[in-house]
Image: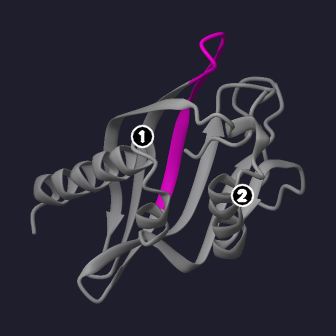
Amino acid sequence: MSTADLRREFEDLLYYEAWLLDHDRLEEWLALIADNVRYWAPVRANLERGREDFTRQQWLAHYDDDKAGLTIRVQRVRTGAAHADEPPARVRHFVSNVRVLESAADCAQVTSNFIVFKSRRGREEYLFVGCREDRWRRVASAWKLEERLILLEHDVIDNVTVLF
């Protein structure tokens, strides 16, 4: 498969993932997630130019979930226990600048930018902007998300029930 074809395949996959999240199809979204996933968004520091603003072993994170943690997030939404999502919010995910950095037959490193807009009760609006560094692994004939590093352009997140 050519690099361009692989990039298009991941664009389609990431657009599909965004569509699932936008349409509250969270159980189907979970099916895209590998059992050994790490889904994390480190808290970033404002540092001088040229220095990485987080460490790979960062203990402080907005998110640092495995598959069980993501499943609990979905269950909380479904049972009404996620009070920040009652009534359900309107959410829209925008994905762009998809790049496949490395690939093998069964693994790919993919980066993308995102904007997520969330609106609740007609008066609360949230906008999240950032980039994602993903590792996808082919399992049987499907790609599964094995790691997602979410780098937000925000220091504070007011509403952490959103999925990126």
Horizontal arrangement in the rendering, residue 80 relative to residue 30 (left or right) = right
* Mark 2, residue position: 76
Quick check: 29 above or below 158? below
Quick check: 97 above or below 146? above
Mark found first going from the N terminus, 2 or 1: 1
Q: Residue furthest top?
A: 123
Is residue 123 located in the magenta-colored stretch of the structure? yes
Residue 120 is tagged as none
User: Identity of the amino acid at label 2?
Assistant: Arg
Image position, residue 17 (x, y; %) = 37, 52
Q: Residue at x 66, y 10 (%)?
A: 123
* Mark 1, residue position: 22
Q: Which residues are magenta?
A: 119-134
Image position, residue 54 (x, y; %) = 78, 44
User: Identity of the amino acid at label 1?
Assistant: Asp
SS majority, magenta: strand
Depth check, mark 2 against mark 1: the one in front is 2
Q: Which quarter of the image is occupied by the N terminus?
A: bottom left
